[in-house]
Image (spheres, helix red, strand yellow):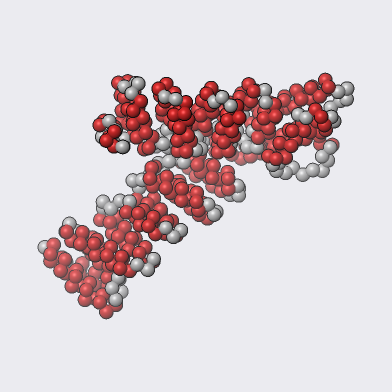
């Protein structure tokens, strides 16, 4: 609650540098005051939830001063706020390796993280840690599957993972030879002569690995090993082809993390071109993950949020579009009017009239131009929903506000639209008389030209 928040935190400005300075100040002055630390980190991360380094530091404070469960709570909040951040999942998994008792829980966390960031070119850091964990557990079945999964999509260490898969296959081969006098033939092309390369599902790979490690099936292990190598080779070749196509985009990503500092025009253009390419590939999952990855360094750019929403709408991802608009309007670009207008349009289209009204209320109305546009947008939305009384009320209140502030130019822009709320017989008289009454009340005169323009607008 606000009353429990330290004064300096409650008075903090939305400026990023001010926040980071305040965090340092509290960490130095009150290093063991968990309430103050929680207050400043909670407040800061509500404004800047993509700062993964601060989530990690927050978790470190919890580790030092609280129970393990409290640390888990911080990491869970972190991955909810920055779900597609590789570094955050890496931090969480490293923590789990040192603190979770059950290896199955650690394994589930790795799999959960990879389900979100497995198509990130930089996810090799998480793959490496996952491999390290399975090696420490001597879980050869899991390790064999990891090396296959790591070949599904190109990463910076794609070639390393393929070399590791072949090395693991050689170890399996030597083991089989030591248990049998027969020679293991790894030239699988002859066994699957004529087979067309295709998608290999996780269930199929699991069965192959299961047979590979089952000594009870005898010679079937040799066939499973051949199959394992074949699948790995096919996935590797396909990933290499894709790597050649996206490599240039990846090289030009200079900042993959969030910061309030602006990106240069070249990086912004690179993201747009990368998104153009992926959108044309027909892989919806890949497109979602790339958009989410892009919206970490580009979170403060409304055009990327708007593009994401448009793409999701066109491709049936309405729930994703709605969620992205919520994040954009509530956190990242909440001071940008255009994103609230887009949100209002979207909410109206999905039948959420209350949500649309709330979105329009968030629009910036500081300037006369924005004020008039917002009034017309709100009134038109009410008209589309059949609420003509509400539309008229919106115009009356807007005209009253403009009259009170003596904004004659605003009145001149509002009256043509306001007059459309009345019947044709009422329009001319009410518009002309009403306009002159307000002008006289303000104490200003209309020029002949202004009067001619406004009356001609009505006549049309």
**Residue in front for this viewpoint, 2 or 242:** 2
**Residue in front for this viewpoint, 181 or 193:** 181
The quadrant holding residue 3 is: top left
The quadrant holding residue 60 is: top left
Q: Is residue 281 above or below residue 439?
A: above
**Residue in front for this viewpoint, 133 or 164:** 133
Residue at image coords 39%, 42%: 332
Left or right: 241 in relation to 41: right
Left or right: 273 in relation to 8: right
- Quadrant of the frame with the C terminus: bottom left
Residue 52 coordinates in the image, percent (x, y) = 45, 31
- Quadrant of the frame with the N terminus: top left
Residue at image coords 83%, 40%: 193
Q: Is residue 39 above or below residue 326?
A: above
Q: Residue furthest toward the right?
A: 181
Q: Is residue 219 visible?
A: yes
Residue 386 coordinates in the image, percent (x, y) = 37, 68
Q: Is residue 452 above or below residue 403?
A: below
Residue at image coords 18%, 73%: 433
**Residue in front for this viewpoint, 65 or 263:** 65
Residue 77 coordinates in the image, percent (x, y) = 45, 35
Residue at image coords 15%, 65%: 439
Residue 157 coordinates in the image, percent (x, y) = 61, 29
The quadrant holding residue 444 is: bottom left
């Amino acid at each position: 609650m606000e009353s429990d928040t330290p004064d300096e935190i409650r008075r903090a400005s939305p400026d990023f540098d001010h926040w980071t300075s305040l965090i340092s100040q509290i960490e130095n002055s009150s290093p063991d005051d968990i309430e103050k630390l929680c207050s400043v980190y909670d407040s800061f991360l509500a404004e800047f939830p993509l700062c993964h380094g601060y989530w990690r530091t927050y978790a470190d404070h919890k580790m030092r001063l609280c129970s393990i469960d409290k640390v888990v709570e911080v990491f869970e909040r972190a991955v909810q706020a920055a779900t597609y951040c590789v570094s955050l999942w890496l931090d969480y998994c490293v923590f789990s390796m040192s603190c979770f008792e059950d290896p199955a829980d650690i394994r589930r966390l790795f799999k959960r993280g990879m389900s979100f960031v497995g198509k990130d070119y930089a996810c090799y850091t998480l793959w490496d840690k996952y491999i390290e964990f399975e090696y420490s557990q001597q879980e050869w079945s899991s390790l064999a599957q990891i090396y296959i999964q790591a070949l599904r999509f190109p990463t910076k260490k794609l070639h390393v993972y393929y070399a590791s898969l072949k090395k693991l296959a050689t170890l399996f081969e030597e083991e089989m030879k030591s248990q049998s006098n027969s020679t293991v033939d790894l030239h699988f092309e002859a066994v699957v002569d004529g087979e067309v390369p295709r998608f290999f599902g996780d269930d199929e790979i699991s069965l192959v690995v299961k047979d590979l490690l089952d000594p009870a099936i005898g010679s079937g292990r040799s066939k499973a090993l051949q199959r394992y190598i074949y699948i790995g080779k096919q996935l590797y070749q396909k990933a290499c082809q894709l790597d050649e196509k996206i490599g240039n985009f990846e090289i030009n990503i200079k900042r993959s993390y969030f910061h309030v500092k602006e990106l240069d025009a070249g990086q912004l253009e690179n993201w747009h071109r990368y998104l153009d390419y992926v959108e044309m590939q027909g892989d919806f999952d890949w497109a979602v993950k790339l958009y989410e990855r892009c919206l970490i360094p580009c979170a403060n750019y409304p055009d990327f949020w708007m593009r994401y929403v448009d793409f999701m709408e066109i491709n049936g991802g309405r729930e994703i579009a709605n969620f992205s608009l919520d994040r954009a309007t509530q956190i990242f670009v909440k001071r940008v009017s255009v994103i609230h207008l887009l949100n209002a349009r979207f909410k109206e289209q999905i039948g959420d009239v209350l949500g649309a009204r709330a979105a329009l209320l968030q629009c910036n109305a500081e300037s006369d131009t924005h004020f008039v546009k917002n009034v017309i947008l709100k009134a038109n939305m009410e008209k589309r929903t059949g609420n003509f009384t509400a539309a008229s009320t919106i115009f009356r209140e807007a005209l009253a506000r403009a009259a009170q502030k003596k904004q004659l130019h605003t009145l001149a822009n509002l009256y043509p639209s306001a007059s459309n709320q009345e019947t044709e017989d009422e329009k001319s008289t009410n518009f002309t008389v009403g306009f002159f009454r307000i002008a006289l009340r303000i104490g200003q005169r209309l020029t002949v030209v202004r009067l001619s323009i406004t009356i001609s607008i009505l006549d049309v």
